[in-house]
Image (cartoon, helix red, strand yellow):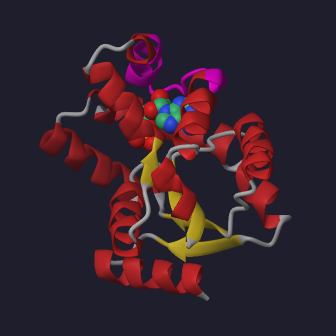
Amino acid sequence: MVRVIFLGPPGSGKGTQAGKLAQSWNIPHISTGEILRSAVKNQTDLGQKAQSYMDRGELVPDQLVIDLVAERLTQSDAQQGWLLDGFPRNIPQAEKLDQMLDQLRQPCDRVILLDAVDEVVINRLLGRAVKENRQDDQEETIRRRLEVYREQTTPLIEFYNASHKLRKVDGDQALEAVTAALQQAIET
Ligand code: AMP
């Protein structure tokens, strides 16, 4: 049983690593970005509300993601642990998540900061733009997403450092080395 929050800039490899680890621990990988992309693809109510923000590289309004996470965490597969990827993205979301987890009696065990330098991140994202044809992986949007990360998400590092749950892992290494470092940071 493990409950982990993954922080890190877009392109740090968070999604890939979170997917691998969640699979090996048999817990759900909850990626708000993935849930939102699928909502956009299916043109659901949520997707229609979120799309323009995502295309511009902005955060979608807090209440939309808070509601979707609240719903996801009460599903039965999430009772044995979870790996949250891409949420929270700012202080109001983190405060709300704290309240939610208190109410659900699901305290988070670890917060992982998967860090990577801008150069690595931008190159990875540009590569992904070609491979996966993601609307928000165009260069200008990538720069905006990095700015948004710096302005709105990095304050969470201090927020979680205060609770002594934060561990930092270097995402510039090769994929397998990052996985091993993450495993160690989470399991010990
Ligand atoms: P990601 O796949 O995590 O990089 O997310 C892709 C896009 O989805 C982001 O650029 C945001 O527009 C939106 N998004 C994902 N998670 C959140 C969140 N927690 N709060 C607001 N917007 C989000």
The quarter of the picture where the N terminus appears is bottom right
107 left or right of 50 in image: right
Q: Which image quadrant: the C terminus?
A: bottom right
Residue 156 rendering spot, x and y as whole percentages = 72, 51
Q: Is residue 59 magenta?
A: yes
Q: Main secondary structure of the magenta part?
A: helix
Q: Is residue 136 left or right of residue 93?
A: left
Q: Residue at 51% of width from left, 46% of height from top?
A: 86
Q: Nearer the viewer, residue 90 or 105?
A: 105
Q: Position of residue 180 (x, y in %)?
A: 41, 85
In the image, what residue occupies the spot 17% across and 41% down?
132
Whether residue 35 appears in this view of the structure is yes
Q: Which residues are magenta?
A: 49-63
Confirm whether the magenta stretch covers residue 37: no
Q: Is residue 84 visible?
A: no
Farthest residue to the right: give it: 162
User: In the image, residue 17 lies at what x, y percent?
Assistant: 37, 66
23 or 174: nearer the viewer: 23
- Horizontal placement of 95 versus 121: left or right? right
131 or 32, which lies in front? 32
Answer with the quarter of the image where residue 41 lies.
Answer: top left
Looking at the picture, does residue 41 appear above or below residue 90? above
> Which residue is rendered at x = 45% and y = 17% of the image?
46
